[in-house]
Image (cartoon, rainbow, N blue to C red):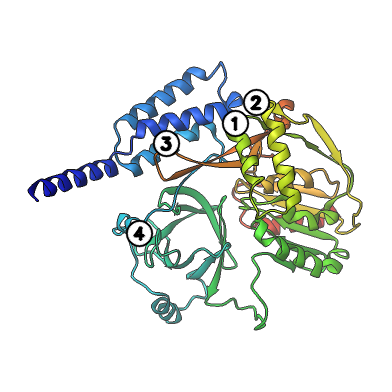
Amino acid sequence: MKNAVILMGLLMFQLNLMAIDCNCTKQFEWLKITLEFNYPGFQDKVKKDNKALYQEFTNDHALKASKISDESECFEVLLAWTKWFKDEHIQMRMGDQDPETVRAKFKDWPKIDFTEETFKTYLSQKDLSNSDEGIYTSDDGSYKIGLRKSKKESIDYEGFILKADSVYWMPGQVKLSMVKTKDGYDVNYYMRDHSLNEVTGSIKDHVISFSGLGSWYRSFPPSPKPVSSNEKQSIYKMEALDDNTMLFVIPTMNESYRKEFKKLVKSNKQKLKKTENLIIDVRNNGGGSDFTYFSLRPFIYTQAYTWHHTQNYSTKINNQKYHDLGSDKNYPALYRWYFKRKGKSLDKKLGQMVGKKGPGKSRLWKKHKYPRNIAVLMNDGCASSCEQFVLFAQQSTKVTTMGTNSGGVLDYGNLHSISFPEANWRLNYPTTRKSAIDYGLGIDGVGIEPDLRINEGEQDWVAFAQNYLEEKK
Protein backbone atom coordinates (compact mmCIF):
# COMPACT_ATOMS: atom_id res chain seq x y z
CA MET A 1 0.00 0.00 0.00
CA LYS A 2 2.85 2.34 0.95
CA ASN A 3 4.60 1.65 -2.39
CA ALA A 4 1.37 2.33 -4.25
CA VAL A 5 1.02 5.72 -2.53
CA ILE A 6 4.64 6.59 -3.37
CA LEU A 7 4.11 5.47 -6.98
CA MET A 8 0.95 7.56 -7.22
CA GLY A 9 2.80 10.55 -5.79
CA LEU A 10 5.59 10.20 -8.34
CA LEU A 11 3.06 9.87 -11.13
CA MET A 12 1.27 13.06 -10.07
CA PHE A 13 4.61 14.87 -9.81
CA GLN A 14 5.52 13.81 -13.36
CA LEU A 15 2.13 14.92 -14.66
CA ASN A 16 2.61 18.30 -13.00
CA LEU A 17 6.03 18.64 -14.63
CA MET A 18 4.49 17.78 -18.01
CA ALA A 19 1.81 20.43 -17.48
CA ILE A 20 4.42 23.06 -16.62
CA ASP A 21 7.04 22.20 -19.25
CA CYS A 22 5.63 22.94 -22.70
CA ASN A 23 8.96 22.22 -24.49
CA CYS A 24 8.92 25.70 -25.99
CA THR A 25 12.12 25.10 -27.98
CA LYS A 26 10.50 22.20 -29.82
CA GLN A 27 7.37 24.24 -30.56
CA PHE A 28 9.49 27.12 -31.84
CA GLU A 29 11.55 24.89 -34.13
CA TRP A 30 8.39 23.33 -35.55
CA LEU A 31 6.86 26.76 -36.22
CA LYS A 32 10.07 28.05 -37.82
CA ILE A 33 10.51 25.05 -40.13
CA THR A 34 6.82 24.98 -41.05
CA LEU A 35 6.78 28.60 -42.22
CA GLU A 36 10.21 28.52 -43.86
CA PHE A 37 9.22 25.56 -46.04
CA ASN A 38 5.49 26.17 -46.57
CA TYR A 39 4.71 29.89 -46.40
CA PRO A 40 4.58 31.22 -50.01
CA GLY A 41 5.89 34.61 -48.92
CA PHE A 42 9.06 33.39 -47.23
CA GLN A 43 11.31 33.96 -50.25
CA ASP A 44 9.80 37.44 -50.68
CA LYS A 45 10.23 38.40 -47.03
CA VAL A 46 13.71 36.90 -46.38
CA LYS A 47 16.25 37.92 -49.01
CA LYS A 48 19.99 38.33 -49.26
CA ASP A 49 19.94 41.92 -47.97
CA ASN A 50 18.01 41.10 -44.78
CA LYS A 51 18.85 37.43 -44.18
CA ALA A 52 21.36 38.29 -41.43
CA LEU A 53 18.74 40.42 -39.65
CA TYR A 54 16.19 37.62 -39.96
CA GLN A 55 18.66 35.12 -38.50
CA GLU A 56 19.48 37.48 -35.63
CA PHE A 57 15.77 38.02 -34.94
CA THR A 58 15.15 34.27 -35.06
CA ASN A 59 18.10 33.43 -32.80
CA ASP A 60 16.91 35.99 -30.26
CA HIS A 61 13.45 34.40 -30.09
CA ALA A 62 14.91 30.89 -30.03
CA LEU A 63 16.96 31.89 -26.99
CA LYS A 64 13.86 33.29 -25.28
CA ALA A 65 11.97 30.08 -26.05
CA SER A 66 14.75 27.95 -24.53
CA LYS A 67 14.27 29.70 -21.17
CA ILE A 68 10.47 29.30 -21.02
CA SER A 69 8.43 26.50 -19.52
CA ASP A 70 5.10 28.31 -19.14
CA GLU A 71 2.76 27.61 -22.07
CA SER A 72 1.24 31.10 -22.20
CA GLU A 73 4.64 32.79 -22.24
CA CYS A 74 5.80 30.40 -24.95
CA PHE A 75 2.76 31.24 -27.07
CA GLU A 76 3.54 34.97 -26.83
CA VAL A 77 7.21 34.49 -27.85
CA LEU A 78 6.26 32.40 -30.87
CA LEU A 79 3.54 34.82 -31.87
CA ALA A 80 6.03 37.70 -31.63
CA TRP A 81 8.42 35.84 -33.95
CA THR A 82 5.76 35.54 -36.68
CA LYS A 83 5.51 39.35 -36.76
CA TRP A 84 8.74 39.42 -38.76
CA PHE A 85 6.73 38.55 -41.88
CA LYS A 86 4.31 41.47 -41.43
CA ASP A 87 1.44 39.33 -42.71
CA GLU A 88 -1.79 39.48 -40.72
CA HIS A 89 -2.85 36.23 -42.39
CA ILE A 90 -0.22 34.37 -40.33
CA GLN A 91 -2.14 33.66 -37.15
CA MET A 92 -1.78 31.56 -34.03
CA ARG A 93 -4.77 30.45 -32.02
CA MET A 94 -5.05 28.63 -28.74
CA GLY A 95 -7.19 25.53 -29.14
CA ASP A 96 -10.11 24.62 -26.96
CA GLN A 97 -8.99 23.75 -23.47
CA ASP A 98 -10.77 22.39 -20.43
CA PRO A 99 -13.26 25.17 -19.51
CA GLU A 100 -12.41 25.09 -15.80
CA THR A 101 -8.70 25.37 -16.59
CA VAL A 102 -9.33 28.41 -18.80
CA ARG A 103 -11.56 30.10 -16.23
CA ALA A 104 -8.97 29.52 -13.51
CA LYS A 105 -6.26 31.00 -15.72
CA PHE A 106 -8.13 34.30 -16.10
CA LYS A 107 -9.96 34.41 -12.77
CA ASP A 108 -7.96 37.43 -11.59
CA TRP A 109 -8.56 39.43 -14.78
CA PRO A 110 -9.69 43.03 -14.06
CA LYS A 111 -13.46 43.29 -13.65
CA ILE A 112 -16.19 45.89 -13.47
CA ASP A 113 -19.02 44.62 -11.31
CA PHE A 114 -22.17 45.03 -13.37
CA THR A 115 -24.70 42.56 -14.68
CA GLU A 116 -26.74 43.45 -17.74
CA GLU A 117 -29.73 44.38 -15.59
CA THR A 118 -27.77 46.51 -13.10
CA PHE A 119 -25.96 48.25 -15.96
CA LYS A 120 -29.28 49.04 -17.65
CA THR A 121 -30.44 50.56 -14.35
CA TYR A 122 -27.22 52.59 -14.17
CA LEU A 123 -27.74 53.84 -17.75
CA SER A 124 -31.40 54.66 -17.20
CA GLN A 125 -30.47 57.03 -14.38
CA LYS A 126 -28.05 59.03 -16.54
CA ASP A 127 -28.41 61.75 -19.16
CA LEU A 128 -26.84 60.06 -22.19
CA SER A 129 -27.64 62.77 -24.72
CA ASN A 130 -23.92 63.54 -25.13
CA SER A 131 -22.52 60.17 -24.16
CA ASP A 132 -21.68 56.94 -25.98
CA GLU A 133 -22.15 54.81 -22.88
CA GLY A 134 -24.40 51.83 -23.46
CA ILE A 135 -24.65 48.15 -24.30
CA TYR A 136 -22.96 47.10 -27.54
CA THR A 137 -22.87 43.85 -29.51
CA SER A 138 -20.07 42.79 -31.88
CA ASP A 139 -21.00 42.42 -35.54
CA ASP A 140 -20.64 38.62 -35.36
CA GLY A 141 -22.76 38.44 -32.21
CA SER A 142 -20.09 36.69 -30.15
CA TYR A 143 -19.71 39.46 -27.55
CA LYS A 144 -22.02 41.79 -25.70
CA ILE A 145 -20.31 44.47 -23.63
CA GLY A 146 -21.14 47.39 -21.42
CA LEU A 147 -19.31 50.59 -22.33
CA ARG A 148 -18.97 53.14 -19.56
CA LYS A 149 -16.90 56.20 -18.84
CA SER A 150 -13.83 55.09 -16.94
CA LYS A 151 -13.05 56.16 -13.39
CA LYS A 152 -9.34 56.16 -14.33
CA GLU A 153 -7.97 59.54 -15.36
CA SER A 154 -5.85 58.11 -18.18
CA ILE A 155 -8.76 56.24 -19.83
CA ASP A 156 -11.95 57.64 -21.37
CA TYR A 157 -14.06 54.49 -21.82
CA GLU A 158 -13.88 50.89 -20.63
CA GLY A 159 -15.78 47.99 -22.12
CA PHE A 160 -16.61 44.97 -19.98
CA ILE A 161 -18.25 41.66 -20.79
CA LEU A 162 -21.98 41.20 -20.29
CA LYS A 163 -22.27 38.09 -22.43
CA ALA A 164 -19.65 35.94 -24.15
CA ASP A 165 -18.62 32.26 -24.21
CA SER A 166 -18.40 32.05 -20.37
CA VAL A 167 -15.09 30.21 -20.76
CA TYR A 168 -12.40 32.57 -22.01
CA TRP A 169 -14.49 35.59 -21.12
CA MET A 170 -16.73 35.86 -18.08
CA PRO A 171 -19.25 38.60 -17.20
CA GLY A 172 -17.61 41.71 -15.79
CA GLN A 173 -14.14 41.12 -17.25
CA VAL A 174 -12.64 44.15 -19.00
CA LYS A 175 -12.51 43.53 -22.75
CA LEU A 176 -11.19 46.89 -23.92
CA SER A 177 -10.21 50.43 -22.95
CA MET A 178 -10.34 53.57 -25.09
CA VAL A 179 -8.31 56.78 -24.89
CA LYS A 180 -9.49 59.83 -26.84
CA THR A 181 -7.17 61.27 -29.51
CA LYS A 182 -7.65 64.07 -32.02
CA ASP A 183 -8.55 61.50 -34.70
CA GLY A 184 -10.63 59.05 -32.67
CA TYR A 185 -9.44 56.63 -30.00
CA ASP A 186 -6.40 54.56 -29.15
CA VAL A 187 -7.77 51.19 -28.07
CA ASN A 188 -6.35 48.38 -25.96
CA TYR A 189 -8.39 45.43 -27.20
CA TYR A 190 -7.98 42.00 -25.62
CA MET A 191 -8.43 39.05 -27.97
CA ARG A 192 -10.15 35.73 -27.20
CA ASP A 193 -7.00 34.41 -25.52
CA HIS A 194 -6.64 37.75 -23.62
CA SER A 195 -3.57 38.78 -25.64
CA LEU A 196 -3.34 42.53 -26.20
CA ASN A 197 -4.10 44.03 -29.61
CA GLU A 198 -3.41 47.77 -29.84
CA VAL A 199 -5.67 49.30 -32.50
CA THR A 200 -7.36 52.58 -33.36
CA GLY A 201 -11.10 53.12 -33.16
CA SER A 202 -13.94 55.56 -33.60
CA ILE A 203 -17.48 56.04 -32.31
CA LYS A 204 -20.15 57.56 -34.50
CA ASP A 205 -23.93 57.28 -34.33
CA HIS A 206 -23.49 54.77 -31.49
CA VAL A 207 -21.39 52.43 -33.65
CA ILE A 208 -17.89 51.55 -32.44
CA SER A 209 -15.48 50.72 -35.27
CA PHE A 210 -12.12 49.11 -34.56
CA SER A 211 -9.29 49.04 -37.09
CA GLY A 212 -9.23 45.52 -38.54
CA LEU A 213 -11.67 44.15 -35.94
CA GLY A 214 -15.05 45.14 -37.33
CA SER A 215 -17.80 47.15 -35.69
CA TRP A 216 -19.97 47.01 -32.55
CA TYR A 217 -23.55 48.30 -32.41
CA ARG A 218 -25.42 49.86 -29.50
CA SER A 219 -28.55 47.97 -28.52
CA PHE A 220 -29.31 49.84 -25.28
CA PRO A 221 -30.36 52.59 -24.93
CA PRO A 222 -32.03 52.08 -28.32
CA SER A 223 -31.37 54.40 -31.23
CA PRO A 224 -33.57 57.54 -31.29
CA LYS A 225 -34.61 56.50 -34.81
CA PRO A 226 -37.85 54.50 -34.54
CA VAL A 227 -37.53 50.87 -35.62
CA SER A 228 -40.57 48.73 -36.36
CA SER A 229 -41.04 45.64 -34.21
CA ASN A 230 -40.41 43.30 -37.14
CA GLU A 231 -37.34 45.16 -38.42
CA LYS A 232 -34.03 43.51 -37.63
CA GLN A 233 -31.15 45.89 -37.01
CA SER A 234 -28.67 45.52 -39.88
CA ILE A 235 -24.92 45.78 -39.52
CA TYR A 236 -24.96 47.62 -42.86
CA LYS A 237 -26.40 51.09 -43.30
CA MET A 238 -27.71 52.75 -46.44
CA GLU A 239 -29.33 56.15 -46.18
CA ALA A 240 -29.93 59.38 -48.11
CA LEU A 241 -27.77 62.29 -46.94
CA ASP A 242 -29.62 64.74 -49.18
CA ASP A 243 -31.50 64.74 -52.50
CA ASN A 244 -28.30 64.00 -54.45
CA THR A 245 -26.22 61.75 -52.19
CA MET A 246 -26.57 58.34 -50.55
CA LEU A 247 -24.28 56.77 -47.96
CA PHE A 248 -23.56 53.03 -47.78
CA VAL A 249 -21.60 51.91 -44.69
CA ILE A 250 -19.97 48.48 -45.12
CA PRO A 251 -18.17 47.38 -41.90
CA THR A 252 -17.47 43.78 -42.98
CA MET A 253 -17.29 41.44 -45.98
CA ASN A 254 -17.99 38.43 -43.78
CA GLU A 255 -19.57 35.65 -45.85
CA SER A 256 -22.22 35.10 -43.16
CA TYR A 257 -23.68 38.54 -43.98
CA ARG A 258 -23.65 38.14 -47.77
CA LYS A 259 -27.41 37.56 -48.04
CA GLU A 260 -28.12 40.56 -45.82
CA PHE A 261 -25.80 42.70 -47.98
CA LYS A 262 -27.48 41.51 -51.18
CA LYS A 263 -30.96 42.10 -49.76
CA LEU A 264 -30.10 45.68 -48.76
CA VAL A 265 -28.69 46.46 -52.22
CA LYS A 266 -31.77 44.92 -53.88
CA SER A 267 -34.22 46.86 -51.67
CA ASN A 268 -32.43 50.13 -52.53
CA LYS A 269 -31.89 49.34 -56.21
CA GLN A 270 -34.32 51.93 -57.56
CA LYS A 271 -32.91 54.65 -55.31
CA LEU A 272 -29.34 53.82 -56.38
CA LYS A 273 -30.33 53.93 -60.05
CA LYS A 274 -31.55 57.51 -59.60
CA THR A 275 -29.05 59.02 -57.15
CA GLU A 276 -26.32 61.29 -58.43
CA ASN A 277 -23.68 60.59 -55.78
CA LEU A 278 -22.83 57.60 -53.61
CA ILE A 279 -20.42 57.44 -50.67
CA ILE A 280 -19.23 53.92 -49.79
CA ASP A 281 -17.61 53.77 -46.36
CA VAL A 282 -15.36 50.70 -45.92
CA ARG A 283 -13.21 52.07 -43.11
CA ASN A 284 -12.24 49.40 -40.56
CA ASN A 285 -13.67 46.65 -42.79
CA GLY A 286 -11.39 43.71 -41.95
CA GLY A 287 -12.50 41.68 -44.97
CA GLY A 288 -14.22 38.33 -45.33
CA SER A 289 -15.32 37.10 -48.76
CA ASP A 290 -15.15 38.76 -52.18
CA PHE A 291 -18.57 37.28 -52.99
CA THR A 292 -20.20 39.50 -50.34
CA TYR A 293 -19.86 42.72 -52.34
CA PHE A 294 -20.60 41.24 -55.80
CA SER A 295 -24.21 42.51 -55.81
CA LEU A 296 -22.92 46.11 -55.59
CA ARG A 297 -20.49 45.83 -58.51
CA PRO A 298 -22.93 46.75 -61.34
CA PHE A 299 -23.45 50.17 -59.72
CA ILE A 300 -19.68 50.79 -59.69
CA TYR A 301 -18.41 49.12 -62.87
CA THR A 302 -17.71 51.18 -66.00
CA GLN A 303 -15.22 49.15 -68.06
CA ALA A 304 -13.13 45.97 -68.11
CA TYR A 305 -11.01 45.70 -64.99
CA THR A 306 -7.60 44.13 -64.42
CA TRP A 307 -6.68 41.62 -61.76
CA HIS A 308 -3.73 39.28 -61.18
CA HIS A 309 -3.66 35.52 -61.06
CA THR A 310 -3.01 33.73 -57.78
CA GLN A 311 -0.63 30.77 -57.56
CA ASN A 312 -0.60 27.85 -55.12
CA TYR A 313 2.66 27.01 -53.36
CA SER A 314 2.81 23.23 -53.62
CA THR A 315 4.14 21.36 -50.57
CA LYS A 316 2.90 18.18 -48.93
CA ILE A 317 1.52 20.11 -45.95
CA ASN A 318 -0.14 22.79 -48.08
CA ASN A 319 -1.67 20.27 -50.47
CA GLN A 320 -3.15 18.31 -47.58
CA LYS A 321 -5.68 21.14 -47.30
CA TYR A 322 -7.26 19.98 -50.57
CA HIS A 323 -7.08 16.28 -49.73
CA ASP A 324 -8.93 17.02 -46.48
CA LEU A 325 -11.55 19.13 -48.27
CA GLY A 326 -12.00 16.32 -50.78
CA SER A 327 -13.26 14.11 -47.96
CA ASP A 328 -15.38 16.76 -46.25
CA LYS A 329 -19.03 15.82 -46.76
CA ASN A 330 -20.11 19.32 -45.77
CA TYR A 331 -19.32 20.17 -49.40
CA PRO A 332 -21.33 18.95 -52.41
CA ALA A 333 -19.97 15.98 -54.38
CA LEU A 334 -18.85 18.20 -57.28
CA TYR A 335 -16.83 20.38 -54.93
CA ARG A 336 -15.21 17.33 -53.30
CA TRP A 337 -14.26 16.00 -56.72
CA TYR A 338 -12.64 19.34 -57.58
CA PHE A 339 -10.67 19.45 -54.30
CA LYS A 340 -9.38 15.89 -54.77
CA ARG A 341 -8.34 16.61 -58.32
CA LYS A 342 -6.59 19.84 -57.33
CA GLY A 343 -4.71 18.11 -54.49
CA LYS A 344 -3.46 15.34 -56.82
CA SER A 345 -2.44 17.90 -59.44
CA LEU A 346 -0.49 19.97 -56.90
CA ASP A 347 1.26 16.84 -55.55
CA LYS A 348 2.92 16.42 -58.95
CA LYS A 349 4.66 19.80 -58.66
CA LEU A 350 6.09 19.87 -55.13
CA GLY A 351 8.23 22.90 -54.32
CA GLN A 352 6.75 24.97 -57.15
CA MET A 353 4.36 27.88 -57.53
CA VAL A 354 1.50 26.35 -59.49
CA GLY A 355 -1.04 28.12 -61.64
CA LYS A 356 -1.26 30.93 -64.15
CA LYS A 357 0.84 34.00 -63.57
CA GLY A 358 0.32 37.59 -64.58
CA PRO A 359 -2.62 39.91 -65.18
CA GLY A 360 -6.08 39.05 -66.42
CA LYS A 361 -9.11 41.09 -67.47
CA SER A 362 -12.77 40.65 -66.67
CA ARG A 363 -15.99 42.28 -67.80
CA LEU A 364 -19.43 42.48 -66.24
CA TRP A 365 -22.51 41.97 -68.39
CA LYS A 366 -24.56 44.36 -66.30
CA LYS A 367 -23.78 47.97 -65.38
CA HIS A 368 -25.88 50.93 -64.24
CA LYS A 369 -25.47 54.55 -65.34
CA TYR A 370 -26.18 55.78 -61.83
CA PRO A 371 -24.76 56.70 -59.40
CA ARG A 372 -22.68 59.02 -61.57
CA ASN A 373 -20.04 59.83 -58.94
CA ILE A 374 -18.80 57.53 -56.18
CA ALA A 375 -16.46 58.17 -53.25
CA VAL A 376 -14.97 55.21 -51.39
CA LEU A 377 -13.75 56.04 -47.88
CA MET A 378 -10.87 53.81 -46.75
CA ASN A 379 -8.26 53.57 -44.00
CA ASP A 380 -5.72 51.13 -42.57
CA GLY A 381 -8.54 49.04 -41.11
CA CYS A 382 -9.61 48.04 -44.64
CA ALA A 383 -7.93 44.68 -45.21
CA SER A 384 -8.01 41.47 -47.26
CA SER A 385 -11.22 41.22 -49.33
CA CYS A 386 -11.97 44.85 -48.46
CA GLU A 387 -8.76 45.73 -50.32
CA GLN A 388 -9.85 43.53 -53.23
CA PHE A 389 -13.01 45.63 -53.36
CA VAL A 390 -10.95 48.84 -53.40
CA LEU A 391 -8.76 47.54 -56.25
CA PHE A 392 -11.91 46.79 -58.25
CA ALA A 393 -13.52 50.15 -57.46
CA GLN A 394 -10.42 52.18 -58.32
CA GLN A 395 -10.64 51.04 -61.94
CA SER A 396 -14.06 52.61 -62.42
CA THR A 397 -14.19 56.08 -63.98
CA LYS A 398 -16.97 56.91 -61.50
CA VAL A 399 -14.88 56.30 -58.40
CA THR A 400 -12.55 58.39 -56.26
CA THR A 401 -11.03 56.51 -53.34
CA MET A 402 -10.16 58.77 -50.42
CA GLY A 403 -8.72 58.52 -46.93
CA THR A 404 -5.48 56.81 -45.95
CA ASN A 405 -3.62 53.70 -47.11
CA SER A 406 -5.40 50.40 -46.60
CA GLY A 407 -4.10 47.72 -44.22
CA GLY A 408 -1.94 45.82 -46.71
CA VAL A 409 -3.16 42.24 -46.12
CA LEU A 410 -3.83 40.81 -49.58
CA ASP A 411 -0.71 39.43 -51.27
CA TYR A 412 -0.89 35.98 -49.65
CA GLY A 413 -4.10 34.09 -48.94
CA ASN A 414 -6.09 30.84 -48.99
CA LEU A 415 -5.32 29.95 -45.39
CA HIS A 416 -4.43 26.47 -44.16
CA SER A 417 -4.91 25.53 -40.50
CA ILE A 418 -2.72 22.94 -38.79
CA SER A 419 -2.03 21.83 -35.22
CA PHE A 420 1.19 22.27 -33.28
CA PRO A 421 2.82 18.91 -32.42
CA GLU A 422 2.73 19.07 -28.61
CA ALA A 423 0.53 22.03 -27.75
CA ASN A 424 -3.16 22.69 -28.07
CA TRP A 425 -2.55 25.50 -30.55
CA ARG A 426 -3.42 26.08 -34.19
CA LEU A 427 -1.34 27.79 -36.87
CA ASN A 428 -3.13 29.51 -39.74
CA TYR A 429 -1.03 30.64 -42.66
CA PRO A 430 -1.47 31.43 -46.39
CA THR A 431 -0.79 28.88 -49.12
CA THR A 432 -1.22 31.11 -52.19
CA ARG A 433 0.63 34.10 -53.63
CA LYS A 434 -0.67 36.85 -55.88
CA SER A 435 1.45 37.33 -58.99
CA ALA A 436 0.87 41.09 -58.68
CA ILE A 437 3.96 41.00 -56.45
CA ASP A 438 6.14 40.20 -59.49
CA TYR A 439 4.92 43.34 -61.22
CA GLY A 440 5.76 45.61 -58.30
CA LEU A 441 2.10 45.78 -57.28
CA GLY A 442 2.26 43.94 -53.96
CA ILE A 443 0.61 45.74 -51.07
CA ASP A 444 1.54 43.76 -47.93
CA GLY A 445 2.74 46.09 -45.18
CA VAL A 446 2.13 49.12 -47.42
CA GLY A 447 -1.51 49.10 -48.38
CA ILE A 448 -3.35 50.65 -51.31
CA GLU A 449 -2.80 54.35 -51.85
CA PRO A 450 -6.09 56.32 -52.04
CA ASP A 451 -6.71 58.60 -55.02
CA LEU A 452 -7.22 61.47 -52.58
CA ARG A 453 -5.60 61.59 -49.16
CA ILE A 454 -7.68 63.01 -46.33
CA ASN A 455 -5.70 65.00 -43.77
CA GLU A 456 -5.46 63.57 -40.25
CA GLY A 457 -7.13 66.66 -38.83
CA GLU A 458 -10.32 66.17 -40.86
CA GLN A 459 -13.06 65.32 -38.36
CA ASP A 460 -15.95 64.30 -40.60
CA TRP A 461 -14.85 62.19 -43.56
CA VAL A 462 -18.38 61.64 -44.81
CA ALA A 463 -19.02 65.39 -44.98
CA PHE A 464 -15.66 65.80 -46.72
CA ALA A 465 -16.64 63.22 -49.35
CA GLN A 466 -20.07 64.75 -49.76
CA ASN A 467 -18.62 68.21 -50.40
CA TYR A 468 -16.08 66.77 -52.83
CA LEU A 469 -18.76 65.03 -54.88
CA GLU A 470 -20.96 68.13 -54.95
CA GLU A 471 -18.08 70.27 -56.22
CA LYS A 472 -17.27 67.66 -58.86
CA LYS A 473 -20.65 68.15 -60.61
Q: Name the disc covering residue 78, or none.
A: 3
Q: Which of 265 and 317 is in front in this view?
A: 317
User: Helix or strand or loop: what does disc 4 sit on?
Assistant: loop
From this viewpoint, is residue 327 visible? yes
Question: Which residue is located at x 52 percent, y 51 percent?
Answer: 200
Disc 1 to disc 2: CB gap under 8 Å: yes
Question: Which residue is located at x 65 percent, y 30 percent?
Answer: 314
Q: Check disc 4 and give the amino acid type.
A: Glu
Q: How far apart are marks 1 and 4 (CA)?
A: 54 Å
Q: Closer to the N terminus: mark 4 or mark 2?
A: 4
Residue for badge 1: 316
Q: Closer to the N terminus: mark 1 or mark 2?
A: 1
Q: Distance between the residues labelled 1 and 2?
A: 7 Å
Q: Nearer the viewer, mark 4 or mark 2?
A: 2
From this viewpoint, is residue 446 visible? no
Question: Which residue is located at x 65 percent, y 83 percent?
Answer: 229
Residue for badge 2: 350
Alpha-carbon neighbours of circle 2 within 10 Å: few (<14), some, or many (≥20)? some
Q: Which of marks 4 and 3 is in front?
A: 3
Alpha-carbon neighbours of circle 4 within 10 Å: few (<14), some, or many (≥20)? few
